[in-house]
Image (cartoon, helix red, strand yellow):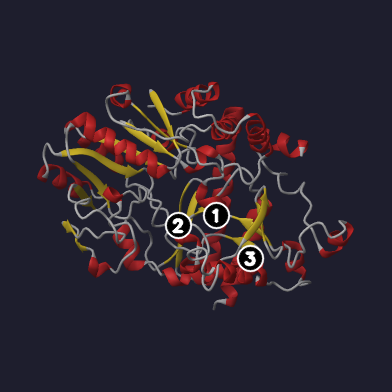
């Protein structure tokens, strides 16, 4: 374990997985039956020694009927994404994850991006253990909370003030309330296809729909993403196509003096991976500033993954408020709202209310501190590692699709990537994704990777993640599996 930790301190991560034993039926007997029986490891799959089975997952799913909804606590983990039943995971370390049947996979989903260091990084494990053994949570002011906030201030360009929450949804709710409070304006502006959590005011035009349902680009139809929303929740929500600056300018002009905030992701991550058009985010920022609109950058997905300072560092932006989640806690529920002092200070008592028993939980702060230390060590070496590996993986996939004559593209921004089965040379917005991307083909492709030892989300609307724990060997094994899967799907 010490060797693994040393490798990660160097930012390379090259030996992270290799130092862990890949249990076979032979070593299983040597362990006296204490380890879970393995049906299929990556090594055995290559030799064709053992059959692939998910029978235990099937039985566990049957147990959930009448107890859980769709097998888990989030519908995205259930049959709608995974087919007849989801795989039930048992343990993970490094870049590898193991299901209850003992099957081993290279994990490219990484808890929807919440694990920038990979699974069970030794320094994060040590931090969580220390916090748990001395008091997981006090709901008081703590020294570690100050330390993590100061680390974020050092890393994130605009973080003049920091307030912690538990999820990206919670942080966004606070950001919207704060923007309305300081501007005295009622309306918010969001973009088609962007997901900012399951808060009523922003739960609109995020799900993938038939193109005919969307209306004209000049006058988009606002389509609620859920039943049960407050009937007036979306009255003050303006929806605009993304990557279209003239459309944004029209919306701002049409609601002059009424818009409290404009909310955007730095990279569109709810419909695969769609980068911003050149100059688009700077045009948005300039327009917001000129009209007294609070610019909220949602970095729940991109934060601490694209760059140490996220998309605002990568694209050289100056947002007023920024929300973080997912990767900040390295697997624990930690989120943050940061931004300009003159706006954030409105959260003081008697101003804009923001409470939370578990905000800044001690155990979460310990995990976040360890996470940020590793991510920024050796002049941010971890980010260089993930960008380099992502290039290797994306270029390999592109070459593979060309070789096999498959109509598919790979879009990525650094370590965030997604395959899109389409005839189009690129996808630049939500409408293009809805119209041109074959989501069923993607799901079929990813599900065919599972028996070959590669795990990713079967949802075409999500994306894969390269982490510090991934290695060149993981990339090469994945490319080999992808080639076999495509051959079988011909």
Residue furthest toward the front? Answer: 66
Quarter occupied by residue 14: top right
**Which residue does the numbered mark 3 point to in the structure image?**
481
Q: Is residue 272 above or below residue 446?
A: above
Tell me if I can see residue 424 in this picture: yes
10 Å neighbourhood of mark 1: few (<14), some, or many (≥20)?
Answer: many
Q: Position of residue 352 (x, y in %)?
A: 28, 30
The residue carrying mark 1 is 109
x, y percent for residue 482? 59, 66
Label 1 SS: loop
Query: Is residue 99 found left or right of 149 in the rendered image?
Result: right
Say if 389 sits above or below 149 in the image.
below
Q: Residue at x 56, y 72 (%)?
A: 486
Q: Secondary structure at mark 2?
A: loop
Instruction: Please tell me which of labels 3 and 2 falls first in the chain.
Output: 2
Q: Closer to the camera, 321 or 365? A: 365
Q: Which residue is mark 2?
A: 462
Residue at horizontal 47%, vertical 58%?
74
């Amino acid at each position: 374990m010490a060797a693994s930790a040393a490798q990660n301190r160097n930012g390379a991560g090259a030996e992270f997985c290799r130092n862990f034993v890949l249990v076979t039926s032979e070593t299983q007997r040597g362990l006296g039956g204490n380890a879970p029986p393995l049906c299929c490891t990556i090594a055995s799959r290559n030799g064709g020694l053992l059959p692939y089975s998910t029978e235990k997952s099937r039985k566990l799913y049957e147990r959930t009927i009448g107890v859980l909804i769709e097998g888990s606590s989030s519908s995205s983990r259930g049959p709608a994404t995974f087919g007849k039943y989801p795989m039930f995971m048992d343990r993970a370390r490094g870049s590898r994850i193991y299901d209850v049947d003992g099957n081993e996979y290279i994990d490219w989903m990484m808890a929807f991006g919440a694990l920038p260091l990979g699974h069970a990084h030794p320094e994060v494990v040590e931090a969580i253990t220390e916090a748990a053994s001395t008091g997981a949570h006090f709901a008081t002011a703590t020294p570690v909370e100050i330390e993590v906030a100061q680390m974020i201030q050092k890393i994130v360009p605009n973080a003049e003030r920091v307030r912690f929450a538990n999820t990206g949804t919670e942080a966004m709710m606070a950001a919207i309330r704060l923007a309305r409070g300081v501007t005295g304006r009622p309306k918010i502006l969001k973009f088609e296809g962007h997901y900012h959590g399951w808060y009523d005011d922003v739960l609109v035009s995020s799900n993938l729909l038939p193109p005919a349902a969307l209306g004209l680009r000049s006058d988009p139809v606002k389509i609620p993403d859920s039943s049960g929303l407050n009937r007036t929740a979306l009255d003050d929500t303006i929806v605009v196509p993304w990557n279209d600056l003239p459309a944004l300018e029209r919306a701002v002009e049409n609601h002059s003096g009424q818009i409290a905030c404009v909310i955007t992701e730095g990279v569109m991550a709810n419909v695969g991976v769609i980068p911003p058009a050149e100059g688009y985010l700077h045009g948005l920022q300039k327009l917001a500033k000129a009209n007294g609109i609070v610019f909220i950058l949602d970095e729940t997905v991109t934060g601490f993954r694209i760059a140490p300072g996220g998309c605002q560092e990568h694209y050289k932006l100056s947002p007023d408020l920024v929300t973080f989640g997912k990767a900040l806690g390295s697997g624990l529920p930690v989120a943050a709202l940061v931004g300009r002092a003159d706006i954030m200070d409105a959260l003081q008592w008697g101003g804009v209310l923001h409470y939370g028993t578990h905000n800044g939980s001690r155990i979460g702060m310990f995990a976040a501190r360890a996470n940020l230390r590793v991510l920024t060590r050796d002049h941010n070496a971890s980010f260089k590692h993930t960008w380099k590996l992502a290039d290797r993986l994306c270029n390999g996939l592109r070459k593979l699709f060309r070789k096999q004559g498959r109509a598919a593209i790979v879009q990525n921004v650094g370590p965030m990537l997604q395959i899109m089965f389409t005839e189009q040379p690129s996808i630049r917005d939500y409408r293009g994704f809805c119209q041109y991307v074959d989501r069923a083909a993607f799901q079929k492709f990813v599900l065919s990777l599972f028996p070959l030892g590669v795990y990713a989300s079967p949802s075409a609307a999500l994306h894969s993640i390269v982490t510090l724990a991934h290695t060149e060997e993981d990339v090469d094994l994945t490319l080999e599996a992808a080639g076999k899967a495509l051959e079988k799907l011909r």
